[in-house]
Image (tube, helix red, strand yellow):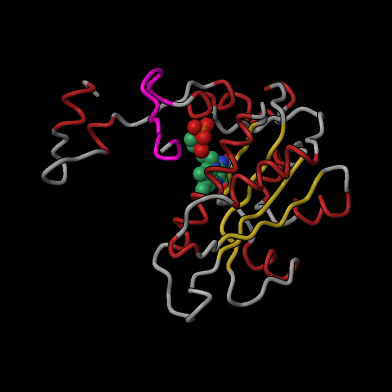
Amino acid sequence: MDDLIKLAPLDPPVLDVVRRRWSPRTFSDRPVSEDDLRACLSAAQWAASTYNEQEWRYVVARREDRKRFSKALACLVPKNQQWAKLAPVLMFSIGRPTFSRNGKPNPVWQHDVGLASGQLVLQATALGLYAHQMAGIEHELIRKTYKIPPEFEPVAGIAIGYIGRADDLPEDFRAAEVEPRTRRPLSETVFSDEWGHPGLIAEASGG
Ligand SMILES: Cc1cc2nc3c(=O)[nH]c(=O)nc-3n(C[C@H](O)[C@H](O)[C@H](O)COP(=O)(O)O)c2cc1C
């Protein structure tokens, strides 16, 4: 019976890690322990996926390992390199667009990779870390650098570490770092009955 108790959060309305997570560009020098890094990757490992396909793979580089870290940094677009060079950990998510058992296209492969990375990021938050995901990566260079097999594709970069100070960032990034975070109201993103009709959720939340 006990394993049928599945409590949903009621109060506060969102999990503390959801509330606390955001994507900084400044990171402190404090290294991330191997145990914490492993916990983040295990959180990804235990994500749900279609047919338990587990389409995700991760390539990880820690800043202490200078050679590996420079290799990873070079795989980001120049704009991301400018701030991500401060991060203690860089990683890339890689995914498989086809099912491993029959080679047919998997329509939700990026969804599953993103879900795994979402869990990784929330685990990082629970450990007092911050993560910044990046679409700005050099896909072909990643493929070459890490000898990624043709059936896999790079998806995103993720910088992880403890928060730093906005003043340590290059000038261009400082203002954005202290800006308040904003979101669309639920009435714009959650519908009932028909597209564009917020219905129940918005009525209940006033959002
Ligand atoms: C898949 C993905 C790709 C992103 N790509 C970049 C990127 O290349 N460079 C960057 O500075 N931020 C990037 N971001 C960060 C977003 O801009 C950020 O998540 C968004 O503005 C919301 O802010 P928050 O994460 O602090 O709530 C990316 C985020 C995600 C989830």
Q: Quadrant of the C terminus?
A: top left
Magenta stretch bounds: 2-14
Q: How many marks?
A: 0
Which image quarter holds the N terminus?
A: top left
Q: Quadrant of residue 104?
A: bottom left
Q: Vertical placement of 44 versus 98: above or below?
A: above
Assess whether residue 89 is covered by the magenta stretch: no
**Vertical side of 1 occupied by 168: above or below:** above
Residue shown at 83%/54% (left/top)? 68
Q: Looking at the picture, how far across and down is residue 159, in whole percent? A: 67, 42
Give the quadrant of residue 28. Answer: top right
Q: Residue at x 55, y 51 (%)?
A: 135
Give the residue displayed 41% in from the left and 18% down from the top: 12
Most common SS among magenta residues: loop
Foreground pick, 107 / 63: 107
Q: In x, y percent, where is residue 144?
A: 72, 71
Is residue 64 shown left or right of residue 154?
right
Residue, far front: 1
Q: Residue lying farthest top?
A: 11
Residue 171 coordinates in the image, percent (x, y): 67, 28
